[in-house]
Amino acid sequence: MNKDDEIVASLDQKGDSDLQILVQQNMRLSRAIFADMPALAIDAGYEPFSKDWMNSYWRSLLIQISGKPVDKIFEWALKTGAASIAALLLQRFGLDLAEYSAAIALAILLLRAASAANKEQTPSSGTQEGESALDR
């Protein structure tokens, strides 16, 4: 297991609220996102990076960093994984490795929101093949 996988595995064990706090406490990451995408900060109905916020904005943020169309974003995200999404977040928002753990936390939250949205669209009676811990 490489260092990226270790960080992802460690953070994936945390609950959404713990990951949210990690992202919120990294001011460079959150400021960079909101400076580049102010519409994500305007909505007073959500606490930034909360579960409700994620459910509303996961697509927008993933589309912004990936350049993928909305109909391809879920498939792309699951194939890409948290470490690669974190690297794209750092690249897209001009951040450095000091923000890497927070970016991985954000990537995990985005993947969890994407999985939850996909499950709502395609309900099943059991675990689907290929489902990971990020699909909770």
Image (cartoon, rainbow, N blue to C red):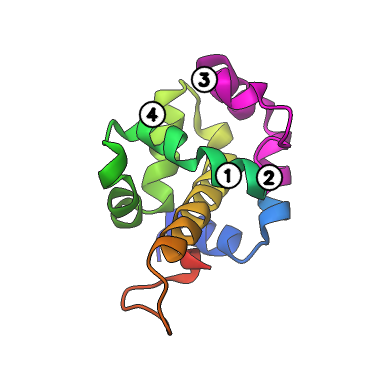
- 18 left or right of 109 in image: right
> Mark 2–mark 1 contact, CB under 8 Å?
yes
Q: Looking at the image, is mark 1 or mark 4 earlier in the sequence?
A: 1
Majority secondary structure of magenta residues: helix
Q: Looking at the image, is mark 4 or mark 3 earlier in the sequence?
A: 3
Q: Looking at the image, is mark 3 or mark 2 earlier in the sequence?
A: 3
Corner quadrant of residue 81: bottom left
Q: Does dot 1 land on a helix, a strand or a loop?
A: helix
29 or 69, nearer to the observer: 69
Q: Is residue 101 visible?
A: no
For disc 3, the marked residue is 37
> Mark 3–mark 1 contact, CB under 8 Å?
no
Q: Does dot 4 land on a helix, a strand or a loop?
A: helix
Q: Would you call the spot at circle 3 few (<14 residues within 10 Å), some (14-19), or many (20 or more)?
A: some
Disc ID at residue 77: none
Q: Kindly identify the amino acid type of the residue bearing the numbered disc 1.
A: Met
> Mark 4–mark 3 contact, CB under 8 Å?
yes
State the residue at coordinates (27%, 36%): 68
Q: Which residues are magenta?
A: 20-49
Q: CA distance from mark 3 to mark 2?
A: 17 Å
State the residue at coordinates (29%, 56%): 79
For disc 1, the marked residue is 54
Whole-percent x, y for residue 74 in the image? 34, 51
Disc ID at residue 64: 4
Q: Looking at the image, is mark 4 or mark 2 earlier in the sequence?
A: 2
Is 127 located above or below residue 89 in the figure?
A: below
For disc 2, the marked residue is 50
Corner quadrant of residue 127: bottom left
Q: CA distance from mark 4 to mark 2?
A: 19 Å
Q: Kindly identify the amino acid type of the residue bearing the numbered disc 3.
A: Met
